[in-house]
Image: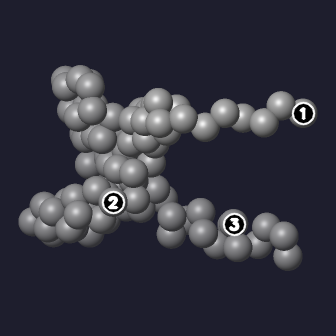
Amino acid sequence: MKTPQISVNKFTSFVGSKEVLTAGAVVFATPIVLRSVEGILKKIPFLNQNFTLGMVVMAFLVFLLSSMVGGIFRTVAIGISAGLLITAVSPFVSPILGKVGQ
């Protein structure tokens, strides 16, 4: 079995990959943006009463905005959009996932 070769170039490629940057945006940037999104949703009467729908709409809007930019900004915006969507659907998915493996 061949041992994988480790180098600075491979590590740099790993850290700078779109996948890692997207995951980092989900973990680190989404909680920051989430506060602003919640503040916006509280000001809109219909979406204030339908928070999940509001979060899905905001995730979709961020995703649409990501198509207008390129490079790292697009990657981060897509990660934030995914984080907002996960936040929106987690109250519905968590009970189902909690039953898996029982």
Please say if 13 is above or below 27.
above
Question: In this figure, what is the number of numbered marks?
Answer: 3
Residue 74 lies left or right of residue 84; in this view the side is left
- Looking at the rendered structure, which numbered label has been put on residue 28? 2
Toward which corner of the image does residue 3 lie, by quadrant? top right
Q: Nearer the viewer, mark 1 or mark 2?
A: 1
Query: Quick one: label 3 or label 1, which is nearer the N terminus?
Result: 1
Amino acid on which the number 3 mark rests in the picture: Leu
* Quadrant in the picture for residue 51: bottom left
Q: Measured from the top left, where is residue 35 in percent x and y?
A: 20, 68
Determine whether the residue tagged by mark 2 lies in a helix, strand or loop.
helix
Percent x, y for residue 94?
60, 69
Residue hosting label 3: 97
Q: Which residue is mark 1?
A: 1
Which residue is the extreme one toward the left?
A: 43
Foreground residue among 91 and 73: 73
